[in-house]
Structures are given as structure tokens and as C-alpha cells.
Image (cartoon, coloured by chain):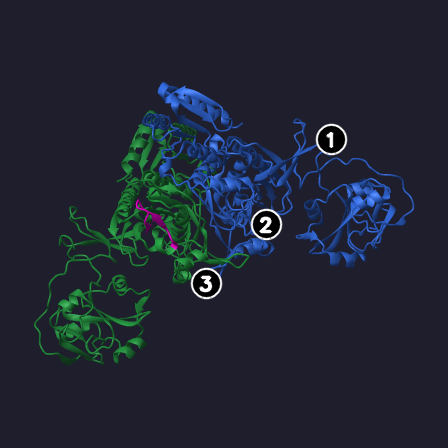
Chain colours: A green, B blue
Amino acid sequence: MRVSQLFIPTMREVPAEAEVVSHQLLLRAGFIRKVAAGIYHFLPLAQRVLHKITAIIREEMDRAGGQEILMPIIQPAELWHQSNRWNVYGPELFRLRDRHERDFCLGPTHEEMVTALVASEVRSYRQLPLLLYQIQNKYRDERRPRFGLLRGREFIMKDLYSFDRDEAGLDVSYWKMFAAYTRIFTRMGLRFRAVEADTGAIGGNASHEFMVLADSGEAVVVYCPDEACGYAANAEKAESLLVPYEGGDEGPLELVATPGRRTVEEVTAFLGLPTQRLIKTLIYRTERGLVAALVRGDREVNEVKLQNHLGVLSLELADETAIEAATGAPVGFAGPVHLDLPLVVDREVANLKAAVAGANRADAHYVNVCPGRDFSVADVADIRLVTAGDPCPRCGEAMRTVKGIEVGQVFKLGEKYSRLMGAYYLDEQGVKRPMVMGCYGIGVSRTMAAAVEQNHDADGIVWPASIAPFHAVVLPVNSQDARQVAAAEGVYQILSGAGLEVVLDDRDERPGVKFKDADLIGYPVRVTAGRHVAEGKVEVRRRRTGETLLVAETEVVAAVQRFLHEGSGE
Amino acid sequence: MRVSQLFIPTMREVPAEAEVVSHQLLLRAGFIRKVAAGIYHFLPLAQRVLHKITAIIREEMDRAGGQEILMPIIQPAELWHQSNRWNVYGPELFRLRDRHERDFCLGPTHEEMVTALVASEVRSYRQLPLLLYQIQNKYRDERRPRFGLLRGREFIMKDLYSFDRDEAGLDVSYWKMFAAYTRIFTRMGLRFRAVEADTGAIGGNASHEFMVLADSGEAVVVYCPDEACGYAANAEKAESLLVPYEGGDEGPLELVATPGRRTVEEVTAFLGLPTQRLIKTLIYRTERGLVAALVRGDREVNEVKLQNHLGVLSLELADETAIEAATGAPVGFAGPVHLDLPLVVDREVANLKAAVAGANRADAHYVNVCPGRDFSVADVADIRLVTAGDPCPRCGEAMRTVKGIEVGQVFKLGEKYSRLMGAYYLDEQGVKRPMVMGCYGIGVSRTMAAAVEQNHDADGIVWPASIAPFHAVVLPVNSQDARQVAAAEGVYQILSGAGLEVVLDDRDERPGVKFKDADLIGYPVRVTAGRHVAEGKVEVRRRRTGETLLVAETEVVAAVQRFLHEGSGE
């Protein structure tokens, strides 16, 4: 194809709202255009990338025994009432009414639809396992859509649902999908990590997320550097070994004045104690009322763990008024002693012998606070955020952290939706049993953006070869030089004839413009017909490394293919 | 693939609401399932057919210079206000509000979106022509969804939009698309006809529809049997030569009693005149008030022609009360003489010399009614429906009619949307000009249903090879016979190895069940391992004709391929 005829509207300036690099580069390089907040056009280059991503996904889903279907995007409210999610889902669910005033939503996910379908069509154990998937637009009315394709309101997903006879069957399906996802992201040439993930929100019993590693990632991955161990988890889920720390000997509870000292640092510095000895008391509001969470002064609360532990639907820090009403003291002086709230005590706090804690009165703390003696430790749990350096829960090695972008998730749903939507089967003995389900998603448009977050430099995108919109661009340096133009045209024909996807930059533009655009768009290989044409040679350059070869026309296919293959799966 | 593992939920009984054969067969053979009125799941077999249809469309769109993009399904209301269609579109437009109370719709078409996109990105004549297309779900909230996939509320479309510098450029794009559509439906193995179509509703200046011929089709195609002429049109659009018929000599207008005679037949029989001599007066309600349409007694009004001629948005027959108020007479006695309504006079009526017409009073008609003398013929137009036998407007040959299902339409839009959405470019002289647009749609899911309407028999579907979900099914007659099972397995491997898409019916079912399912699903070729396995032979049967070959394993690939190729493009 010829660049002069392709619709690639590159931009010099991107809007200020494009905060992340994938958003900026996909706009600048002419891949996407915004229609409304979180809603985008995919232009021809993006559509080519999406086709490559979906082709890889489709092949691997089929290989793993998945059968492709296409379910409606508009879903009847009745199904969501049946699963009790119509009300739970809140304002993120796009809702609409048809002309007969019947309620529908635009599917953010398809558990209800697929389970109702299978419930009405599958009756026997002989029809299981069944793995159904689709690739389709999904909708989520985000309060604050941002980061371009990373958090949009309309996006493309692959979702597969597995239906098995029992937990053992689910286990097989789950690990089949895990393996398929590993192949998918490997084939896409992305550096990624599969990590243990929280299962709280959808309600299941095991989950892994696939994270594309990128400094700009919103998610934090905690992992064990010992590859033999291999532990890795989303920070929301990550655990660590409990390191013994008692911090001093028991003594009588004592009230001390801490005038104006509110923060952990202020209080412990004032008292000459390490931050580990302080009990941090955070008061949260839930739909069941206020609750106090206790972590050590050097730790942060992991709100996902806390929410799962409590089993509540909503959890947010209480406001100042509520804190003052509950503690009788200004913010900064809350503590568990004589506090009339349910206490959730982190394991490390329960382990302390003599701690410092707010006294629930202004400018005062208790010292020698003894968990169990001075407040109840009936409810002890791991509610803290793990950080770099914490010991691996499996092998004790000091763990590390890295940032990532979630592009896929595999999830054991169990029997929840089967029971709600009536998906039962008859087993070999004729006994009616609920099917055991799993669900498995990949953010298709998100993966495109994540690939850019991971693969770019100051000049633009650096596409992995397997998902690049084209394999190579061919350009004459000087569009007025007939020999260069002819050489470029010849190389373009040779490469196209060899089955490579190539564009010819035939525009009458200055060399700088063509080079800049080639780098910005991120073709993995650039072939330049310049002054060496006189010697019958062209320059083949690898986008990622800048490595350049000067080759004869007869060698150009091999050179391009070498750079493409070296570029894949690295 | 093995039938035992495929999700093909066949049914014995279909719901009564499945009125048309494609709806019945696609349900029975396990291709689709209903979710809500006009909203369907596409199950694995359907998804395979859809993939084949879209692959053919994509190849031909690309070959014709189209560039694939993907526009959002949810469209901001602002764009529809800009084109004045937000209010015009009425209740067929699915509308929704986001959490910030902004209005959106689910796109029934994408003129607004694509024109706004091109308006903001294309500035120069050098960037034109530009042909952008997408394949995507579309939405139309039909008052009465029916006929399965033929009139759904959620359906899959390919829509391409062409942007050209001028009418001459549009003409090139238009005929390019016309040729591409001809290739597409030919490659799909469908019998079809491209016919001239009405352009009224969207407002353009030329259009053709592609009709898949089927007795069950809702559309009537009028065509000239002389292939050298080739005239063909949708009945809504079809014209015919005006055949001279004056019907008697002028005489003085005379009132005659016609007690209780209201219909054309009653009045003409009573008066002993041919139906041609009667003027039928139909009163319509439009947004501009009532209007009377006059056609000859042996003709019907073509409401599309009438509406276009009047240039009104709404047109429907007036109710009894309105007719009585306007004519002063009961229904059945309306006529143009002394009628105080705008008259639209069909050409044939204007041609009459002495006619009969209602007298606008009960039980009375006028005879010797003279158009021009007794009522105004200021507004003469062709407003009648053409029927079989009418002379071709080009060559005069007696035309024929056939029924069809519209699966595609090409449309010259002209400058309408360019002007409304601000899609201008600078020409070679730096003069700002509106782009000249065309739009070109194919109903993808509709084509699947139309293919079934055209290709089925009493036993089930008869897929054309190029869009069949699989090329062939292999089955052992007796699942308990080890030799037959082994032979079937062997043939299945041979055919799969030859690159054919084959399923093995490995279910432990009676032969009758397997044969019936194979015919119902409509695999183009069935290979049976039965008693001839003893002689090393299997039976290869062509679904469409029942033609059967007994061949050795070494000949099976050639036999299957022969039947497939004979089956395509017929």
C-alpha cells in the first residue's frame, strides 16, 4: 500500500488531556481519534493492529477448545435482575429503554447472557466441558474515563466462559486458559507476568491477572526474584511472611501528652520510638457502619484485603465529622483503646507487645498498649499492603515490585452464576448438579495501548513485529531522485511479493518528514533507498535498536525477515 | 472438529413466531437463539458463516481501495443534531444517557460519525478519494421486529463511505462499489439481482439495491426479461412506459346514482365500464395536511413515489373521519371534482378523456369526468405501482416480477452530509469545496438469513460452499461398527489434512439422527462410511442434489472438492 493513499492523519500537537504515552502516541501517529470521553475511532492502522491481536487470540482460544459465538451487546434487564446485578452494578452500567419501555443495558460483561444460554441448551454431562467465547465491544460508563484506550467507556474484549462438571474440570479449563494466555502474550512479543489476583468483586475462588510490564502501569506487581519460587501477585492481593516483631516489653497502659503530634512520624519522633511500635487506626465507612482498621505505623492498609475480609460492598475512609463523632477527638488521635467500633487487627499489630496508639482525645496517646489486654484482638487478619523487600510468602526471599498494566484475567467463578441463572446438568447417575464456571477476559483494545506503553521511545512507537500494523516501510530519501524512487518501488514490490506487509512512502515530502513519521508510527523495519542506490544498495534499519544494514536488492527480504524475527518474542 | 464436542443445539420444534424459513431453520439447526425481540445469539455455526461472509466482504472492500476502520457504536447526540436527524429519526433510534446526562444513540448508520471524522482530518484534494468502511453491529428499534435475522433490532452491517472531489469522482467510487458488490454476492454463491432503488428517505441522487432472489422475499423486483436491456428496479422505484389509453370520448359531466357501490369493481360493473375508466381517489395525511392521489382504477398507488413527489416526511392513508370531513361523503365516494384538496394526478389519469369518479356525496359518482376540464391537472406525476406485464421504460418489453431480499445497497449521497457536517477540502486552485459522498451497506447477518431463504429444501439448509460453516461432514452409519468408525476417522483425517473444513459426527446416535442433522445443518457434502467400507469405499453425497458417488479413500478429497466447486457460484 502507498502512504499517499492511506488514511494516517498524524498530528504534531496532542491535547493536554492525553496524559499517558500510549494515548499521546496513538493520537499523534494517526491510530485513534476521540469521539467523546472514553470513546474512540480506530483508524486504519489501529484496525490492522486489532486484527492481528484478535487473530492471535482466536487461534489460541480455538486451539484450547474454545468455540466462538457472538452474543448481543444489548442485554435485557431481566437477566441482570436474576443475577442481582442490575442494582449492584451502579452508574457504570449503561442503561437504556426500548420503544416499549423495556429496560436493557449495554454489556460490560456477559456472565448473565452466556449462563442463561447454556442453562437453556445444555442438559447432560456429555455436553460438558463447554468453552464459549466472543470478541466484541464492551461498555462501562466510567466516572472519569482517562488514559486513552486504557480506561475507556467503549472497548473491545475477548471473553470466554467455561462450563464444567465439577471443580476438577474447572481446574483443567482454568489452566488451559492460563496456558493459552501465556502463549497469546508471548506471541504478541510483550513482556508480561501472570500474577495472583484478588477475587473479591466478582466473587470467585481463584484468579490470575496477566500484566504487561510498563513503568507507566497503574498496577503494582509484587514478585519473588527467585525464579524457582515464581510467586507473583497483584499488590492488592500480595501476601508476605509474617516477620516476628514485638517491639518492647509489656508495661502498664499509660496516657501521655502528644501536643499537636498527629502523624506517625510526629508521634514516634516525639516519643523516641520506631514507627513499627505505633498502631495506626484508620476509620472506614461501610454499608454496615463504621469500622476501625489497625496496621503498624510503618504499613499501609490494603483496602481490597480489608473489604474482602469484611465482606462489604462499599468501603471508604470516613470523613472528619464521622471520625470526631466516633472517637470524641480530632483527627490524628484515634486509637483502639476504649473505642466503640468493630476492630480489624492486622496480624503484625496483634503481634506487638507494647505499642503506641491514639487515645481518642486531643493531643494524647497511650503507650504500653497491649493488644488483647487493652483492646480486643478477636478479629485478626492480614490487611496490609505488601511492599518491596517484604519476604516472599512461599520462600521468604525479599520480594520486588514492578509496575504493570492488566491486559487479561482468568477467573474461577465456581457455581455462583450457574445457581443464579439455573445452569444445571444431569450427571452420569442422573443427579442434577450446577455447572462449575470460569471466565477469562482479554482487553483487546487495551492490549494495543499496553503494547505502546511498553514499546516506545522518544521518537514514537516500536511495535512488536507480530502485532505491527505493517512489517516494514520503504521510502526513497529524495522523492525527486528518479533512481531512488525506482529503487524504492522495486524493493517495495520485492518485499510485497515475498508476503511481507509493506507500505511505500511515496509522498513528495522532505526526508525528515518521512523518517519522523516512520519512527512515530513504529514500523518494525525501515528500508531506505538513498545515495547507496548508486551501488545497488539500500539501507535496512531496525526500529527498536537502530541497527542498520546496507544490502543489495537480492538480500533485502532476508534482512527484513531477520530484523522481524529478532524483534518477536523478545 | 468432532460433533460430540461442538455446541450445535438442534431443536425439533420451533416457536410459532418463527414465520419465515430462515428463522425456522437457523433456530432448528442450532445457528441462532433468541434473547429478546429482534435480538439474537449467534452460535458457533452461525459465527463461522459470519466469518466467511465478512472475509469475502473485507477482501473485496480492500481490493476496491477501501480502508477498514472501526467507529464507536455509541454516538453523541450532538452529531445527530448537526445533521438534523436526532428528531427526524423517531422511535427507531435507540437512545441512552450517560451518567453525566449526556445524550447518545446506538448507531443505526454512521454518516454523521464518519463525515465528522473526515471533516476534521482531511483538508486537501490530494487526500481524496477516501473510502472508509467498517463491519459492526448496528441498531434499529423496530416497532415490530420479525422474520428472525431479516428484521432484527441488533444486526451486523458492513458500511463503507466514499469521499470524492466531485460528482465524477463519486461516479467512479460508486461503480467500483457496484462491481465489488457484484463480486461479493457472486462469490457467496447467491442468485441475486442489482436493481435501481428509491433514494427518497436518505436523500441522494442514485441508488441500487442488491436483492437475493427468494420466493419469500418481501421486496418485489420488476425487471425486463431482455438481457440486452437489463432494466431492473425495486417495485417502489420501478417505472414503465406510458401506454396510451384515453377510454372513450369527452361528454358533459353527469352525476349518476351508484347506490352502495364503493369499490372499483362494484362501480365499474354497475356502470358497465372497464376498470381503467375509473379514477381512484385516495386521501393521504401528511405533515403538511391532507392530499388526494389519483390513479386509474386498475392501478395501485406507489406510496414511495408519491411521498418523494410531495417531498414529505410522513405519508399515511387518512382515516375515515378525516375522509368524510374532507369529502362530505362516506368512504368510497371520494373524487377529484369540486374537491378542496391538493391533487396529485398520475400520468395515466391525466391521459383519460372521459372517466368515472366519486362525486363526494353518498351513493353517487360522476361520469364523463374530464381531467383538466373538471379538475386541475396542474400536478401530474408517475405515482403508480408497476406490475408484471407493464412495458419496460427502456425497451418496451413486457416486464416480469420476482421476489427478493435486499442484502446490500449502494447510494450516491452527494453533498448533503458534507455540507451539514462541514466536510470541505481545498481543490488545486485553493478553492474550498464540499466533498461528494456515497454510502454503501451490506447486511451481514441479513445475508446469512437471505442465503437460507434461497438455499434450503424440506430437509434443511443447503449452504453455498463458500459460506458454509464447514465444507463436509463425515459420519459412520453404525457407531457400533468398529470398521465403519475407523474408516470415518480415516476419511476425516484425510480431508482435514487436505485443508478442508470437516466435522466428524462421532456421536453414538442412530443413523437416522445423524443423517437428519447433516441435512438440517446443510453441510454441502456428506461422506458416509457404511457397508461399503468392506470394499474400502465410502459414499460421498452432494447436499444440494443428492448426487452420490461411491469412492475409495484415495479418491475422497477429489470427490468432495468436485462437489464443492460445482456447488459454488451456481
Which of the chains bears the disc numbered 3?
Answer: B
How packed mark 3 is, by other alpha carbons closer than 10 Å (few <14, some 14-19, many 20 or more), is few
Q: In the drawing, what numbered circle is on residue B185?
A: none
Q: Residue at x 54, y 38 (%)?
A: B450
Quadrant location, the C terminus of chain B? top right
- Between B544 and A125, the residue placed more toward the observer is A125
Q: Amino acid at mark 2?
A: Arg
Q: CA distance from mark 2 to mark 3?
A: 30 Å
- Between B234 and B514, the residue placed more toward the observer is B514
The image quarter in which residue A547 lies: top left
Pointers 2 and 3 within a single chain: yes
Q: Which residue bears the numbered disc 2?
A: B419
Q: Which residue bears the numbered disc 1?
A: B396
Identify whether B299 is placed above or below B99.
Answer: above
Q: Which residues are magenta?
A: A421-434
Quadrant location, the N terminus of chain B? top left
Residue B299 visible in this rendered orientation of the protein? yes
The image quarter in which residue A248 lies: bottom left
Q: Nearer the viewer, mark 2 or mark 3?
A: 3
Mark 1 or mark 2, which has the lower sequence index?
Answer: 1
SS for dot 1: loop
Q: Amino acid at mark 1?
A: Gly
Q: CA distance from mark 1 to mark 3?
A: 62 Å
- Between B139 and B555, the residue placed more toward the observer is B555
Q: Which residue bears the numbered disc 3?
A: B100
Which of the chains bears the disc numbered 2?
Answer: B
Residue B102 position in % (x across, y down): 49, 61
Q: Residue at x 74, y 59 (%)?
A: B321
